[in-house]
């Protein structure tokens, strides 16, 4: 019985204490309300649509005139009348390495090499302009098909003025090759003199 009384008293005390504590909290409760700051008005401005810039190219009303065409004039050196006759003069040549055959441009006996094609040399422009004349003696061989090969300069006057023109012309000559017993043979160490002369115009 005493235990029930004690428990009942404690329960009442605890209940009373709780109610008193709650009343205390309610009476002293302070609510702090934090107001948000004033909102800043935002104006939304609609931008006009971007338009693509149009570039107008004005045609050039005065186009540049093309440069005047300059007519080409072909200038040919006036070398006067050139005599490219091939005159042969016998020369006294020292024989080396065997007998030396001399080519004559006159009539040939049967079986000898005969020139079938002879090309005139070109008169050098500088020599023609300066009125220079001269000659070139060349040594050469003829192969079995009549071609001129192994051309060399033996002598010339003036030195090296007409050498190139003479060699280029002789290289284009064609011969009927020499034949023995119906068989073509090579001919070696033939010589020829090409004269370069200018006939004076009257």
Image (cartoon, grey):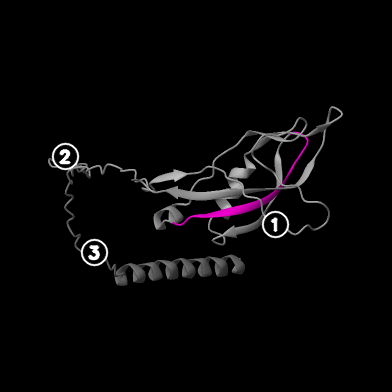
N-terminal of the pair, mark 2 or mark 3, is 3
Q: Nearer the viewer, residue 112 or 22?
A: 112
Q: Residue 14: x, y in percent?
A: 48, 69
* Residue annotated with mark 2: 59
In whole angstroms, how far apart are the C-alphas of marks 2 and 3? Answer: 70 Å
* Residue at x 40%, y 71% (from the top left corner): 21
N-terminal of the pair, mark 1 or mark 2, is 2
Q: Residue 153: x, y in percent?
A: 65, 55
The answer to whether marks 1 and 2 mark residues whose Cβ atoms lie closer than 8 Å is no
The image quadrant that residue 178 belongs to is top right
- Vertical placement of 198 versus 93: above or below? above
Magenta range is 132-145
Does the magenta portion include 140?
Answer: yes
Q: Residue 64: x, y in percent?
A: 18, 44
In whole angstroms, how far apart are the C-alphas of marks 3 and 1? Answer: 137 Å
Quarter of the image with the C terminus is top left
* Residue annotated with mark 1: 92
Q: Residue 29: x, y in percent?
A: 31, 69
Residue 141 horizontal side relative to residue 54, left or right: right
Give the class, few, some or many, for how many residues have Cα within 10 Å of label 2's Cα (few <14, many ≥20).
Answer: few
* Residue annotated with mark 3: 35
The image quadrant that residue 130 belongs to is bottom left
Give the class, few, some or many, for how many residues have Cα within 10 Å of label 3's Cα (few <14, many ≥20).
Answer: few
């Amino acid at each position: 019985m005493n235990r029930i009384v004690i428990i009942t008293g404690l329960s009442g005390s605890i209940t009373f204490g709780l109610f008193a504590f709650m009343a205390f909290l309610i009476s002293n409760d302070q609510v702090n309300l934090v107001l948000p700051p004033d909102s800043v008005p935002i104006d939304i401005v609609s931008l006009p649509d971007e338009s693509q810039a149009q570039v107008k190219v004005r045609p050039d009303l005065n186009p540049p005139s093309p440069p005047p065409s300059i007519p080409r004039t072909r200038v040919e050196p006036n070398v006067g009348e050139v005599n490219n006759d091939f005159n042969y003069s016998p020369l006294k040549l020292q024989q080396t390495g065997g007998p030396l055959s001399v080519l004559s441009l006159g009539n040939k006996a049967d079986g000898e090499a005969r020139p079938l094609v002879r090309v005139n040399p070109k008169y050098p422009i500088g020599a023609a302009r300066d009125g220079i004349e001269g000659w070139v003696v060349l040594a050469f061989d003829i192969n079995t098909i009549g071609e001129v090969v192994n051309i060399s300069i033996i002598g010339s006057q003036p030195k090296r003025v007409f050498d190139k023109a003479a060699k280029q012309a002789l290289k284009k000559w064609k011969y009927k090759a020499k034949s023995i017993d119906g068989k073509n043979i090579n001919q070696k160490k033939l010589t020829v003199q090409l004269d370069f002369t200018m006939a004076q115009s009257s």
